[in-house]
Image (spheres, helix red, strand yellow):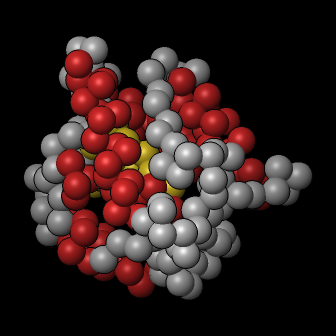
Amino acid sequence: MTESYTNIADKVAATGYYVVVPDFFNGEPYDPENVKRPKEKGIEVAKPVIEALKSKGVTAIGAAGFCWGDRYQPWKFHTNPSFCVLLHPSDIGVDDVRVKIPIAILGAENDKVACPPTLVKQWEEILKAKPEIDSYVEIFPNVSHGWTVRYDPKDPSAVKAADKAHQIMIGWFDKHLK
């Protein structure tokens, strides 16, 4: 797990939340060619984490996913977690956002492959058609896929964009968990 993910987890925890960050790849980076770590195994890692939280009396669970981690959030758990935030998602289709839980999606203007703005706009239209589901969609200008975790800390505009996304994520937690 990279330092940036733990820094983000620490930032969320500093606002009073109990944060759990599953290691989907046992300390290795994601490699689509690694047959020992197919994407489908992510659900096998996430389910016991949620069950462990529930066994400790946790009744409301929020999920934030970055890139690959978005793939196994709302549509696999349906009502657990209680809501989710997707930051620069990837490998998600139009039908995947037909969710029954509150959802926030933060996309990148310069993401041409993993999550192009045209796809984010399609998701936004799908979500607008279901006003009973709380949703928020924003396409961040002048950023590329991964901008919330892989940014140059010496670049003030990159830091500002990442921080804004992190604040939206924390605000979503505040809205749905407090």
Whether residue 68 is visible to the viewer of this picture, yes or no, is: no
Name the image quarter holding the N terminus: top right
Asked if residue 104 lies left or right of residue 131, the reply is right
Residue at 71% in and 51% down? 160
Q: How many marks on residues?
A: 0
Residue at 41% in and 64% down? 39
Q: Position of residue 172 (x, y in %)?
A: 39, 40
Quarter of the rendering containing residue 121:
bottom left
Q: Position of residue 57 (x, y in %)?
A: 23, 14
Asked if residue 57 lies left or right of residue 150, the reply is left
Asked if residue 147 lies left or right of residue 172, the reply is right
Whether residue 48 is visible to the viewer of this picture, yes or no, is: yes
Query: Looking at the picture, does residue 72 appear above or below residue 96?
Result: above
Residue at 18% in and 66% down? 98
Quarter of the rendering containing residue 123:
bottom left
Name the image quarter holding the C terminus: top left
Asked if residue 150 lies left or right of residue 171, the reply is right
Residue at 38% in and 30% down? 174
Q: Position of residue 13 (x, y in %)?
A: 54, 24
Q: Position of residue 89 (x, y in %)?
A: 46, 65
Outermost residue toward the front in this view: 36
Query: Looking at the picture, does residue 58 appear above or below residue 36?
Result: above
Pick whichever, 93 or 46, lies toward us: 46
Outermost residue toward the right in this view: 154
Pick whichever, 3 or 97, lies toward us: 3
Pick whichever, 77 or 127, lies toward us: 77
